[in-house]
Image (tube, helix red, strand yellow):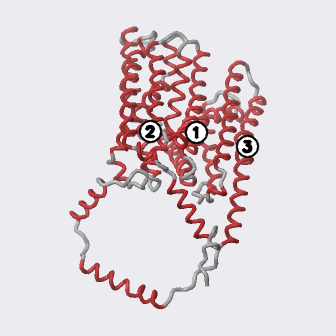
Amino acid sequence: MCAYVCAGANSQSFAGTGALITCVKSFPGSGRGVVLGLLKGYVGLSGAILTQLYLAIYGGDDSKSILLLIAWLPAAVSVVFLPVVRVKPPPPPPRRNDDGAFFCFLYISVALASYILVMIVVQKQSSFSHAAYAASATALLILLILPLLSVVVRQEYYYCYWLKKRELQQEPPPEPPTSTSTWVTAEKPTAEVAQVAEHPPPTSSSCLGSCLKHMLNPPAHGEDYSIPQALVSVDMLVLFLATICGVGGTLTAIDNIGQIGQSLGYPAQSINTLVSLVSVWNYAGRVTAGFASEALLARYGVPRPLALTLVLLLSCAGHLLIALAVPRSLYAASIIVGFCFGAQWPLIYAIISEVFGLRYYATLYNLGAAASPVGAYVLNVCVAGRLYDAEAARQRGDGESRTCMGVRCFRESFLIVTAVTVGGALVSLVLVWRTWSFYKGDIYAKFRDAVAVQDSSDGGCAVEQRPQE
């Protein structure tokens, strides 16, 4: 079973990395927060989508059938879309309408999330036949395919039209080099050979010293860090600690939301509603954080790490509601925790791409994700799990049921989680201070300039810039 879970978890990581990294590199100067928010938002809805498809295909509670669906459906989708998952060079800014396309994706995803929420509520309130499940899943598939038909095909048409126009504007190939340039080129290898003879290959100790010097002298923010440079940088350490505290705390609440409701005396129907609220608001947090942080950065120059700090502080309100066990407050707590858990991921991944560059983004992206299980283990297993078991043993006695009832089951745990999350917010302020001047500038300028230069060299204004005879 451990091997099965390991394979499944790694397959999710491979699929997510391939899709997400490709999209970020295809839109380097168009608002990475928006791209990440949309993609992570659909990830947040994926569990509910698979549930609706399972009910439509198999129509009942069957553990073997759900495992079979998980085995074949994601693999089939990956194979179908393999040809289109690739880094695509963007057209120049005058021919782009990324914002409009991204907002179309947003509106469709909001409609999809709303539809899923309505169907979850309706299916829990009434009994559905297999045909009814199939009809609801058909509408769900239409909403899933709608972005492909209404947005992607149109954008592809504009892109192909621009490529054809640029080919027609390209200038003729340059003339062959003169004899002087050929003579210089022929002499260059001799000079290089002489230089190599004067400077023999470095020894292993000098290689180690140069490697250490390279690691400890990182480039400026926004440039491409190497993996060793990112691993030993203060910025990555600070972001990793903040992620452990923030994501670990919200994961602790999400993983225990059922037991929290049970210990506080909520009925089973209410506990199911709490789980649904967490899922839907998880999506809302991912999308909102992506679009809102991008808008704040573009209009007011608000650093993205500051948005992460605010999300961490907001999550403390949900943790305190759980710890204090205010009557009927668990609904609000589930909304806050679900929203903050989802909101952290686009911010973390966007910060990594912006501060450390895109060259090794796939590795650094997964390095940031590794903070999640670390935080979950420390806060969920070592803190909440042990304190819950201790309170259950105190109530029932050793050897009896481990079910805990009452407000004391999770009070101490979530007071600790709140304190740790506040500490994570304070740590993230260090990253805000270190990257303040970087985010106050135009962090996407070099990508737009590169596209403009490429356009002018490939075609574009080349006809106007051609020298006179």
**Where is residue 375 drawn, in percent x and y?**
40, 32
Q: Is residue 325 above or below residue 200?
A: above
Position of 381 with respect to 104 (left or right) is left
Judging depth in this view, the residue of 454 and 208 nearest the camera is 454
Determine which residue is flagged by label 1. Answer: 291
The residue positioned 57% from the left and 57% from the top of the image is: 87
Indicate the quadrant where residue 376 lies: top left
* Mark number displayed over residue 67: none
Q: Earlier in the sequence, mark 1 or mark 3?
A: 3
* Mark number displayed over residue 305: 2
Q: Are marks 2 and 1 in contact (CB under 8 Å)?
A: no
Determine which residue is flagged by label 3. Answer: 146
Judging depth in this view, the residue of 124 and 151 nearest the camera is 151
The three-letter code of the residue at mark 2 reads: Pro
| Distance (Cα) linking label 2 and label 3 | 34 Å
Q: Which residue is farthest bottom?
A: 179
Q: Secondary structure at mark 3?
A: helix
The three-letter code of the residue at mark 1 reads: Phe
| Distance (Cα) linking label 2 and label 1 | 15 Å
